[in-house]
Amino acid sequence: MAKNKYKDILLERIRGGAPLTLGQQLTLSLMLSYPAILAQLSSVMMQYIDTSMVGHLGPAAGASIGLVSTCLWLMGGFGMAATSGFSVQVAHHIGGNDFRGARDILRQALVCVLAFSGVIALAGVAVSGQLPYWLGGTDEIAADASRYFLIMSLFMPAMLMDWTCAAMLQASGNMKVPSILSIGMCLMDVAFNYLFIYKLEMGVVGAAIGSGLAEVITGVLMFSFLAFRSPELRLTQERGSFRPTEPVIRKALNISGPMALQNILMRGGYIAATVIVAPLGTISIAANSFAITAESLCYMPGAGIADAATTLVGQSIGARRKELARRFAWINTFMAMGIMGFLAILMYIFAPQMMGLLSPDAEVIALGARVLRIEAFAELGYAAAMVAYGACVGAGDTKWPSVMNFGSMWVVRIIPAIFLTRAYGLVGFWICMAVELTFRGAIFLVRLYRGKWLKNAF
């Protein structure tokens, strides 16, 4: 309780214009980061559990999920872009001590994101039958892949509502509740997966149902806290309209538009990567999917710190404190680089053991461990890119960072991967990935240093 009160005091100092020492800035960054890290890690563990449980059914079952996972990321990325368009505005209003304005934006966000998530879900259902074949999947894995994608698409509204409520709480500085509920979702996922995959013998379909039900329950709990208990955003504090207004929507589109376009191009790159890897066969598809899941244990702390950076920069911008926003961006970026650098060393050492938790197949373990050790050298750059991008989003600077992400993905990763994958198999693809992430981190550090990301915020 004392820690939470101290965090609130420091956040109030940002909003009130009071000075913060370097130690207080670092403390606040840590206090907001560690719950966000736990939330991200719990999300990764949920994916890890799904992959591990399905992976022990055989390489084909794991490959069926891996084949369509990039398309699920694409759909989720649209939702995250839509959410950010509103949550950044909420952070700015809270930073300016305009809590009623923040709640007005929240009401509009709930309506818009829910409607948008319904459109995404229907699109997913419509393409689920043919999608595995479009991605180069064989008959061996296409049926399970199609069913998995169909079920996860149906749960997309619950997933996006969960993410929206969590983002709004984080924008207010509340990282604790989303973290606790995300950990609870992970535990529910274990229980549901055990029931549906093994006890009811539903295999890949059971994994989708288990994950979806965990998302539904968590989304309901997240919304309940946000709507009825959040001190800053509780909707029962006054009556307000849920009807979207032109100024809020326009600003949301200005923030979300570049992010949505980036999502199409970036996630399109991930889909292109799936198409590049698919001809290598079931073992390579499974090893690629499992290695991505294993690596996420290393990079998700960076994603959590990026969430904290978005909040701190956003509230500093709302309080009209440019230099404080800049310092928070650098503090969080270096923090993520330090943590992910340490985890990269552990990933390099324990790569075979990490893969062994996901699959009993010796070929999958050997190939997955090899590519994980290549990727370990890219984690510093990945950390810099993630957190610097989060800081840019907090400032409402999404246009050029989106261009940077897209250019790096397609020019430095995908195009060379077409040729290196043919020559060196999955190893060639992961070499391209490691080089690209390092390059992306470097260009984002340059953008932070030049300060152009703050230009439009003041």
Image: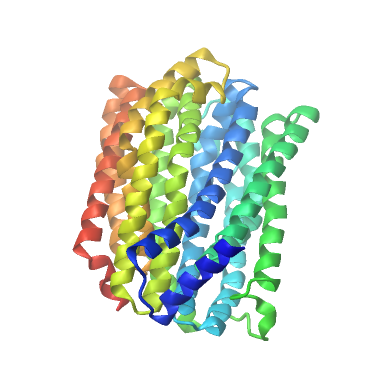
Query: As displayed, is residue 214 above or below residue 262?
Result: above
Q: Position of residue 394 (x, y in %)?
A: 39, 66
Work out whether residue 153 or residue 233 is closer to the camera in this orientation and state it: 233
151 on left or right of 317: right
Residue furthest out toward the right: 200
Rendered residue at 64%/71% (across/down): 230
Work out whether residue 253 or residue 348 is closer to the camera in this orientation and state it: 348
**Residue 109 figure quarter:** bottom right
Residue furthest out toward the bottom: 239
Q: Position of residue 164 (x, y in %)?
A: 57, 63
Can the viewer see residue 190? yes
- Where, quadrant-wise, is the N terminus in this rendering? bottom right
168 on left or right of 268: right
Query: As displayed, is residue 129 above or below residue 14?
Result: above
Rendered residue at 63%/47% (across/down): 183
Rendered residue at 34%/45% (across/down): 337
Q: Position of residue 120 (x, y in %)?
A: 57, 56
447 on left or right of 122: left
Q: Position of residue 342 (x, y in %)?
A: 38, 36
Can the viewer see residue 164? no
- Where, quadrant-wise, is the C terminus in this rendering? bottom left
Rendered residue at 74%/38% (across/down): 191
Query: As displayed, is residue 315 above or below residue 358?
Result: below
